[in-house]
Amino acid sequence: MNTAPSRVAAVDCGTNSLRLLIAEASAAGPIDLLRRSEIVRLGAGVDATRRIAPDALARTLAVLGSYAVDIRGHGAQRVRMVATSATRDAANRAEFATGAHSVLGVWPEVITGAEEAALSFAGATRELDLGVYPRPYLVVDIGGGSTEFVLGGPGERVTSVSVDIGCVRLTERHLNHDPPTADELTSMAADIDVALDRVELQFPLSAAQTLVGVAGTVTTVAGIALGLPSYQAERIHLARIDAAAITSVGRRLATMPAAERAALPVMHPGRVDVIVAGALLLSRVVERAGVSSVVASEHDILDGIAAALLEPGT
């Protein structure tokens, strides 16, 4: 008989951030023991060069080494690392995979956009009360290189689409001034709209009854909208942010120079240069979906990975 591990570690390596969750099994579901997130910008320049830069690889492996120490210290019995958009696009991803394996002791899985979407959906919706949050859910995972859209409900067939727009990729493509010019913002909005048109070839965004936003762009915009004095994950998690507030925050960020964005109390230093693109993307999604609010979730692909690892026989 296969028995489930009692303690696991999930690592998510995206285009912008490298994140860790160590969780323990309980009767009520996984319990967080440790969450860490560092901006490593593995995907810097990948949209143009299709290669991971040496300095980006070095930054990522250094942080991954510190995560390995945490994983060993917590006695995790099973570890899974996934890599997403930047690694999918990089011609030298084997170099990254070899380096990650040497540091962490497991091979990173370069997952597809569909796999990324399914894991994010599982993590983001696991604790939603159907009486409070009507379905179908639309989970939107805004990453650095790609954004995943997943429509469905718990226990139902879900439909997912992954498109190659994310806060890092959009910034590198369109934004060259601080703050951005009107022409740059217009160009970026057009790029976003083309991608959203592709999403809507699969399903209408307006089909969503509850829009759930995950990852750093959404939680940062939520923290600003809530007026928090510092980044407070417990107040951001499952907060409902009005659509008008999201639009207002996006417009405000777009007029701020980087120094002013950096001074916002919820802003991570590694997100200062890409938050304008992420916030505009979120605003366009909200507008197209026609929802009155967004539920900001701190639970995402990491939680989906951890929950799967804690199941018997996996």
Image (tube, helix red, strand yellow):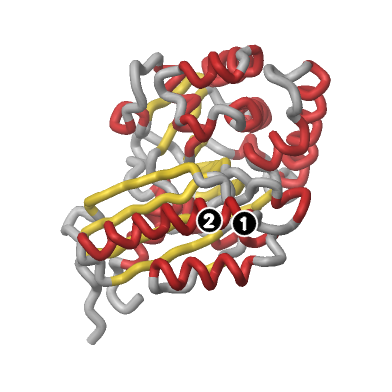
Residue 150: % across, % down? 56, 49
The structure residue drawn at horizontal position 65% and vertical position 57%, both measured from the top left corner, is 52
The label number, if any, that marks residue 58 in the structure image = 2
Q: Give the Cα separation between the discs numbered 2 and 1.
A: 6 Å
In the rendered view, would you say 21 is above or below 238? below
Q: Which residue is mark 1?
A: 54
Near-viewer residue (309 or 183): 183
In the rendered view, would you say 252 is above or below 293? above
The structure residue drawn at horizontal position 68% and vertical position 17%, both measured from the top left corner, is 179
Near-viewer residue (277 or 263): 263
Which of the image's four quarters has the C terminus?
bottom left
Near-viewer residue (167 or 133): 167
* Residue type pointed to by label 2: Ala
| SS category of the residue bearing label 1 | helix
In the rendered view, would you say 290 is above or below 128? above
* Residue type pointed to by label 1: Pro
User: Label 2 neighbourhood size at 10 Å, few (<14), some (14-19), many (20+)?
Assistant: some
Disc 2, disc 1: CB below 8 Å? yes
Residue 136 appears in the picture as rendered: no
In the rendered view, would you say 100 is above or below 49? below
| SS category of the residue bearing label 2 | helix
The label number, if any, that marks residue 222 in the structure image = none
The structure residue drawn at horizontal position 28% and vertical position 56%, both measured from the top left corner, is 22
Residue 178 appears in the picture as rendered: yes
Q: Is 52 on the left or on the right of 141, as rendered?
A: right
Which of the image's four quarters has the N terminus?
bottom left
Q: Is 24 on the left or on the right of 302, as rendered?
A: left
The structure residue drawn at horizontal position 58% and vertical position 51%, both measured from the top left corner, is 56
Residue 140: % across, % down? 55, 42
Residue at the extreme left of the image, as rendered: 27
Residue 25: % across, % down? 21, 61
